[in-house]
Image: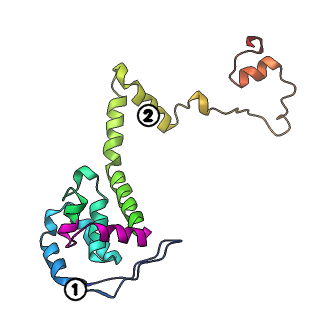
């Protein structure tokens, strides 16, 4: 099975891995691998990576590694190496050392997976923050911080509604300055 490959776009500051026009590396192993591809939860990601121009084994690794460790099938790197026709994991480590774009692609896909779950997480936050139970207070606080309805005292800055001409605070008393700074009164010293 021969797939047409596009030229991989280099990431800024990193050399691009030269992609051949036709990926004909280890065709028998690739055909066997692609027969069992449907069994893996990362098969669609693998196919998308091939379209980006990744060599098939590297595309498979990136797709596999971008999943949370508990969701990976096969579960270990050694078993994964066996599935793609490698005797050991040494070759995978060598790829990652030579081409930092591999780890960046894994990171990009991992973040993409997180964003896919964002609506469900936000709904869970809303559900929990809406609960009248005292145990939901941290979720309510987080909700109000995220929506800008509450700003923790530690993040409050000195905000004065003044023009540049009024910005001189030398006319304020020591008590007023202390109150503005949130330190109480000057007599508390």
The image quadrant where one finds the N terminus is bottom left
Instruction: Specify start and end residues of the magenta stretch as a single range.
Output: 81-100
142, above or below 137, in the image:
below
**Cα distance between the residues tagged 1 and 2:** 51 Å
180 sits to left or right of 14: right
The residue depicted at 22 percent of the width and 62 percent of the height is 78
Indicate the quadrant where residue 161 lies. top right
The image quadrant where one finds the C terminus is top right
Residue at the far bottom in the pictured view = 21
**Mark 1 residue crowding within 10 angstroms, few (<14) / some (14–19) / many (20+):** few
| Magenta stretch, main secondary structure class | helix
Residue 88, x across and y down, in percent: 24, 68
The residue depicted at 80 percent of the width and 38 percent of the height is 163
Instruction: Give the labeled residue for mark 2.
Output: 143
Instruction: Give the labeled residue for mark 1.
Output: 2
Residue 26, x across and y down, in percent: 21, 82
Camera sees residue 48: no
Residue 142 within the segment the image draws in magenta? no
Query: Which label is found at residue 95?
Result: none
């Amino acid at each position: 099975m021969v797939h047409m490959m596009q030229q991989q776009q280099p990431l800024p500051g990193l050399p691009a891995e030269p992609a051949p026009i036709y990926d004909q590396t280890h065709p028998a192993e690739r055909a066997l691998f692609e027969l069992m591809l449907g069994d893996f939860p990362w098969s669609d990601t693998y196919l998308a990576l091939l379209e980006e121009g990744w060599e098939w084994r590297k595309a498979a690794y990136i797709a596999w590694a971008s999943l949370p460790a508990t969701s990976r099938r096969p579960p270990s790197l050694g078993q994964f190496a066996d599935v793609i026709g490698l005797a050991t994991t040494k070759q995978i480590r060598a790829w990652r050392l030579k081409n930092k774009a591999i780890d960046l692609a894994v990171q990009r896909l991992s973040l993409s997976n997180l964003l896919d779950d964002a609506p469900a997480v936000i709904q869970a936050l809303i559900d929990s923050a809406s609960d009248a139970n005292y145990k939901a207070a941290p979720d309510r606080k987080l909700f109000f911080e995220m929506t800008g309805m509450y700003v923790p005292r530690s993040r409050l800055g000195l905000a004065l509604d003044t023009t540049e001409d009024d910005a001189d605070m030398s006319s304020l008393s020591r008590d007023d300055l202390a109150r503005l700074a949130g330190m109480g009164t000057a007599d508390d010293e």
